[in-house]
Image (spheres, helix red, strand yellow):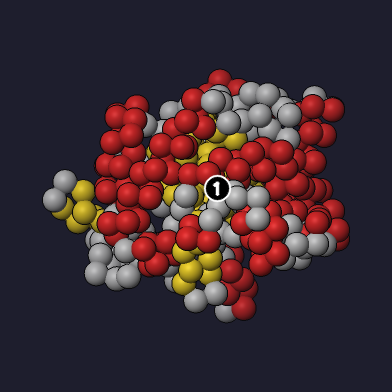
Amino acid sequence: MIPGYANFNSTRKYGQKFTLTYRTFSEFVVSPIALGTHLGEMNEIDSDLYREGIQYGLQNGLNFIDTALNYRGMRSERDIGYVLKSLIHDKKILSRESIVVSSKAGIIPGDVMKNLVPKEYLQKVLLEPGIIQGADLNEVEHQKHVLTPRYYQFAIAQSKQHLNLGTIDIYYVHNPEISMMALGPETFYQNMESVFSTLEDQVQCGNIRYYGLATWTGLLKSPEDNGYISIEEVVNRAKSIAGEDHHFKFIQFPLNKQFTESITFKNQLVQNEFHPLLVAAEKLGLSSTTSAPFQLGKVFKENQDPHECLQEIIQTGGVLSTMVGMKQVKHIKENIMSILPDARN
């Protein structure tokens, strides 16, 4: 595995080679858009495109990659690992310390390389070996989520192996609102506290650097809605485990013309006052990354200007970086060009 993790000096040095306006977290500097790897088919054709696209992006100004254990049946993590090994370990074109990688777990994945759909993966890889118990599954309609410490230990080890990394920079609990809907607030926050204890241990072991929540609607709902997650309560649970030195530092959520709640909806209570999510996160010392800038393709179907949409999001105050699903080099080139400073004039 490739040792090391992103640091401030190396990421800043990387950014100085390009004309993008980079964003600063206390420990590293990242490009305003990240290479998202959610969309695509679970086949070799799309893997070839992703590998080519990730390599191009990393060599042309994008030093942030976002993925998840379940993306494309585990192919996305493996495709990223292939490129990182090539550029960092084999060719030594890039340094590990200049690249930020985030991944996620919580949703039951499948493994296409082992011909295991999620149902089979759950049974053969998780339940039969005793990684999780049946009671650990939180189900809402067709969605299955896990919020138990042992699963995250296992998932992080899997992600590290796929990515060829000794340390993952950011690791998210993925779509925790599913477990919230199944468990209710009291049990949910208790379970989250146990998971955070494990994630703090993973930080101490050097397997991850920071952790967070990657949500869809959980942080954007009304407090009265089923599945709503209080970001202040989550931070309090992290503090109860590790005090002020906790490593819960990131949240991820959709931001686009359809999902504007993080800017407009005062649904997050911080110190007895309601704020929109982006403001609440800043007050709590969290960094916000956003997803789905093109509304999962709706922007293109509605003939909106995707570059204008992207510019609008990255200019939103409080957004560290937005995750853009892109695998073709031509689309990566277009997206980089659209966020150059000159493109806004």
Residue ID for mark 1: 151
Which residue is rendered at x = 32% and y = 70% of the image? 226
Tell me: 311 left or right of 109.
left
- Residue, far left: 272
- Please state, as top left, top right, bottom left or bottom right, where the N terminus lies in the image: top right
Q: Position of residue 148 (x, y in %)?
A: 47, 49
In this view, the residue farthest toward the bottom is 302
User: Would residue 321 be visible to someone looking at this image?
Assistant: no
Q: Can you see residue 199?
A: yes
Percent from the top left, x then y, of residue 249?
A: 41, 38
Q: Position of residue 52 (x, y in %)?
A: 81, 48
Disc 1 marks a residue whose amino acid type is Tyr
Residue at (46, 53) in percent of width and height: 147
Locate residue 332 relative to residue 248 in the image: left or right: right
Task: Depth check: give the residue in front, 127 or 193.
Answer: 127
Quick one: SS at disc 1?
A: helix
Would residue 149 appear left or right of 82 to someone viewing this image?
A: left
Q: Quadrant of residue 274?
A: bottom left
Q: Is residue 269 left or right of residue 311?
A: left
Residue 156 or residue 24, whichever sits in front? 156
Quarter of image, res 46: bottom right
Look at the picture and state if 50 lies above or below 195.
Answer: below
- Residue at 38%, 67% (x, y): give it: 181
Relative image position of residue 240 (x, y in whole percent) = 28, 36
Residue pictured at 21% horizontal, 54% vertical? 269
Q: Give the mark count.
A: 1
Q: Nearer the viewer, residue 11 or 126?
A: 126
